[in-house]
Image (cartoon, grey):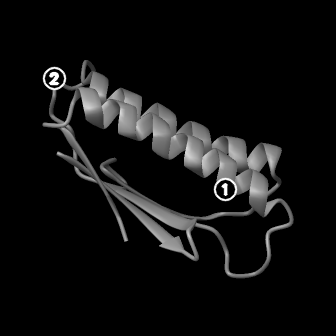
Amino acid sequence: MIQVTIYRNDNRINAFKLSGHADSGPYGYDLVCAGVSAVSIGTVNAVMTLCDADLQIEQGEDGGYLYVQIPTNAVDNIEQVQLLFEGMLVSLQSIESEYGEFIKIRTL
């Protein structure tokens, strides 16, 4: 199961973590994993490219782990970053509502 943790501070997303594997299908055909990966990596790429934000990123070598944090120093386009992160959360929640046995989201 993929565990998604959203970390908020003052009602803003300041980090998120994805861990685990969906195991909803054979390797290479796991649609839940592919969807979650596309949404999360697409968001990271969008934030870095469109907002020129330098995120702190940790990834597992074999997949199954992604931790992304907004740096503690000020990000110029923080409202845009937040909008993209909130959009990511909506997309992940849509996946969870359809495939809840393979993905769980919690907010801290």
- Find the residue positioned furthest to the top: 29
Disc 2 marks a residue whose amino acid type is Gly
- Left or right side of 17 for 13: right
* One can see residue 59 in this view: no
- Could you tell me which secondary element the residue under label 2 belongs to? loop
Instruction: Residue at 37% x, 28% y: name it.
Output: 34
**Closer to the eye: label 1 or 2:** 1
Q: Residue furthest front?
A: 11
Of 31 and 58, which appears nearest the observer?
31
Q: Point out which mark residue 25 bears.
A: 2
Residue 20: x and y in percent read 23, 51
- Location of residue 87 by image quarter: top right
Q: Which residue is mark 1?
A: 82
**Left or right placement of residue 68 versus residue 93 in this view:** right
Circle 1 SS class: helix
The residue at the far bottom in this view is: 72
Asked if residue 35 is positioned above or below residue 101 in the image, the reply reads above
* Furthest residue in direction right, as rendered: 76
Please identify the quadrant where the C terminus is shown: bottom left
Point out the tag, 1 or 2, that comes first from the N-terminus. 2
How far apart are the two marked residues, 1 and 2, measured between alpha carbons? 32 Å
> Is any atom of residue 78 visible in this view?
yes
